[in-house]
Amino acid sequence: MLKNNIEVDVKVKCIENGMTQAQLADKIKTTSPYVNRIIKKQDGVVNKTFVQMLEALGYDIELTYVKRED
C-alpha cells in the first residue's frame, strides 16, 4: 500500500514553494492538465506492479521528500 497522498503532497510542496501546478508544469516543460492527471492517477507516480510486488513481500511504501540544497 502506498501510504502517501501524492495529490496532497504535490499541492503542499507547490504552496511551500509559492508555485502553482501550472508553473510547475511549465518548469518541467509539460502541460498543467498532464501534471494534474499524473498526480490524480492512482498508479501514475508509483507503478502499480511495483506496489503489488512490495505488498506481496509484506511491505507498505512511504515516500520521503528531502529538500535539495542548491
Image (spheres, grey):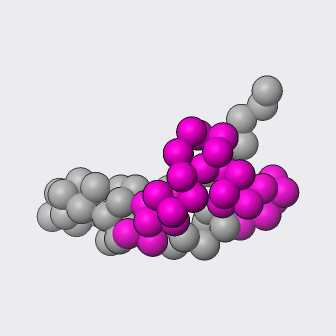
Using the rendered image of the protein, determine whether residue 8 is visible from the camera's viewpoint.
yes
**Residue 63 pos. (x, y %):** 50, 56
Q: In the rendered view, does 9 fall on the left or right side of 57?
A: right
Q: Is residue 28 magenta?
A: yes
Q: Nearer the viewer, residue 67 or 26?
A: 26
- Residue under the point 84% across and 57% down: 18
Residue sticking out furthest to the right = 18
- Residue under the point 44% across and 66% down: 37
Q: Is residue 24 above or below residue 21?
A: above
Q: In the rendered view, does 32 fall on the left or right side of 56?
A: right
Q: In the rendered view, does 49 fall on the left or right side of 47?
A: left
Q: Nearer the viewer, residue 36 or 11?
A: 36
Q: Nearer the viewer, residue 55 or 12?
A: 12
Which image quarter is the C terminus in? top right
**Residue 52 pos. (x, y %):** 19, 63
- Residue under the point 35% across and 71% down: 42
**Residue 1 pos. (x, y %):** 32, 71
- Residue under the point 23% across and 54% down: 50
Q: Main secondary structure of the magenta part?
A: helix
**Residue 40 pos. (x, y %):** 45, 71
Q: Is residue 49 magenta?
A: no
Using the rendered image of the protein, determine whether residue 39 is visible from the camera's viewpoint.
no
Q: Nearer the viewer, residue 60 or 28?
A: 28
Magenta-tinted stretch: 12-41
